[in-house]
């Protein structure tokens, strides 16, 4: 008997990478147009610039070449300021995988402090490393849509920048966070695999499972730490791209617990200030092993098989 026969509805999910065109629903949170907490609130020029970039992203379809974005001198200046300041913490506060991959990206001329990189160039680089690609999106997506894209090694990326008056903090994802936080980590095979595994688990999942997976993603891919030579180091993109929280996370102010996806999946989190609690992995490899154990324990009436050659998935009903 299949799950269909039992009358269980499996929510729609993309079966091939091109169907991610249907996974770009944004949720509204911290919009500069109507939220006084947003640093760009009331700045018409910023709001229009952001709208222009978001419109371009909304019209993007799988397979389109990624259009060249002419960033303004003000935007380049914001990028440079953030990059230079974060650099001062790289040796002491970031994991080895981040430092190595960032150095390689710099040496390849893909991520440099003086100019904002083009997403097309980043894709060319990542494609050769782990096969991950970025596709433009217009803001915060629903967790279901966002996680589904990871199943196909696609990362939905914003293209606008944070407001220039608040360069070291952004209440939402922006291009600086995506490029300085996520891109060097997606060049790492363990982070790439963990992200894809979370994505594959999310396909056809229940709302409750999506919430758990989004929470695991949050605490490892966005705010995860690991220990190297007895010292706390950042692996999460939300820390790697935020000077203040990077220092806070590695200090003894917040709580630190060992990374265990079962516990992590039901932990509540902070999305408007520093986290009071971080999870610490023994290593990236160990985090992947634990994540896979967790995946195997998730109840599901079907299995998903991913074919990397066609970038498509097959659903296999269990009886
Ligand atoms: N959307 N564009 C974008 N970027 C994110 O990092 C993101 C998202 N939607 C949901 C989300 N993150 C969180 O729910 C994760 O924990 C999955
Ligand atoms: Fe992020």
Image (spheres, rainbow, N blue to C red):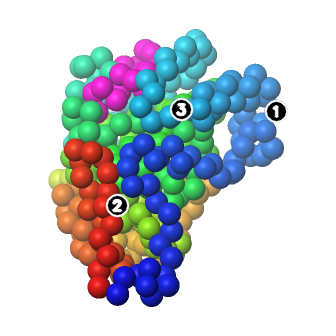
Element type where label 3 sits in the image: loop
Residue 136: percent from left, percent from top: 50, 34
The residue at which mark 3 appears reads as: 60
Does label 2 or label 3 sit earlier along the sequence? 3
Residue 130: numbered disc: none
- In this rendering, the answer to whether 298 lies above or below 256 is below
Q: Earlier in the sequence, mark 3 or mark 1?
A: 1
Q: Is residue 113 magenta?
A: yes
Instruction: Measure the alpha-carbon separation of dots 2 and 3.
Output: 23 Å
Looking at the image, residue 297 lies above or below residue 237: below
Q: Nearer the viewer, mark 3 or mark 1?
A: 3
Q: Which residue is mark 2?
A: 200
Specify whether 318 is left or right of 56.
left
The mark that comes first in sequence, 1 or 2, is 1
Q: Is 31 positioned to the left or the right of 275 in the image?
A: right
Q: Quadrant of the N terminus?
A: bottom left
Question: How packed is label 2: few (under 14 Cα within 10 Å), some, or many (20 or more)?
Answer: many
x, y percent for residue 30: 69, 47
């Amino acid at each position: 008997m299949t799950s269909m026969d039992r009358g269980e509805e499996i929510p729609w999910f993309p079966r091939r990478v091109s169907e991610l065109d249907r996974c770009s629903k944004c949720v509204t949170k911290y919009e500069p147009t109507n939220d006084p907490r947003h640093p760009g609130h009331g700045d018409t020029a910023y709001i229009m610039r952001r709208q222009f970039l978001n419109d371009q992203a909304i019209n993007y379809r799988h397979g389109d070449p990624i259009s060249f974005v002419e960033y303004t001198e003000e935007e380049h200046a914001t990028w440079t300021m953030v990059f230079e300041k974060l650099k001062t913490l790289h040796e002491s506060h970031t994991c080895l995988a981040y430092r190595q991959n960032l150095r390689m990206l710099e040496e390849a001329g893909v991520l440099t402090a003086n100019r904002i990189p083009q997403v097309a160039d980043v894709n060319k680089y990542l494609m050769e490393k782990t096969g991950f690609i970025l596709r433009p999106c217009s803001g915060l997506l629903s967790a279901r849509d966002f996680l589904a894209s990871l199943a196909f090694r696609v990362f939905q990326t914003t293209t606008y920048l944070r407001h220039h008056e608040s360069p070291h903090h952004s209440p939402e994802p922006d291009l600086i966070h995506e490029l300085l936080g996520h891109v060097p980590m997606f060049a790492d095979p363990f982070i790439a695999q963990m992200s894809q595994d979370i994505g594959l688990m999310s396909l056809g999942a229940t709302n409750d499972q999506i919430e758990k997976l989004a929470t695991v993603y949050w605490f490892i891919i966005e705010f995860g730490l690991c220990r190297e030579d007895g010292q706390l180091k950042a692996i999460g993109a939300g820390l790697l791209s935020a000077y203040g929280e990077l220092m806070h996370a590695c200090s003894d102010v917040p709580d630190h617990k060992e990374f265990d996806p079962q516990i992590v999946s039901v932990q509540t989190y902070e999305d408007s200030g520093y986290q009071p609690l971080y999870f610490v992995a023994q290593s990236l490899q160990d985090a992947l092993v634990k994540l896979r154990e967790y995946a195997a324990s998730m109840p599901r009436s079907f299995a998903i098989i991913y074919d990397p050659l066609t970038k498509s998935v097959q659903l296999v009903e269990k009886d």
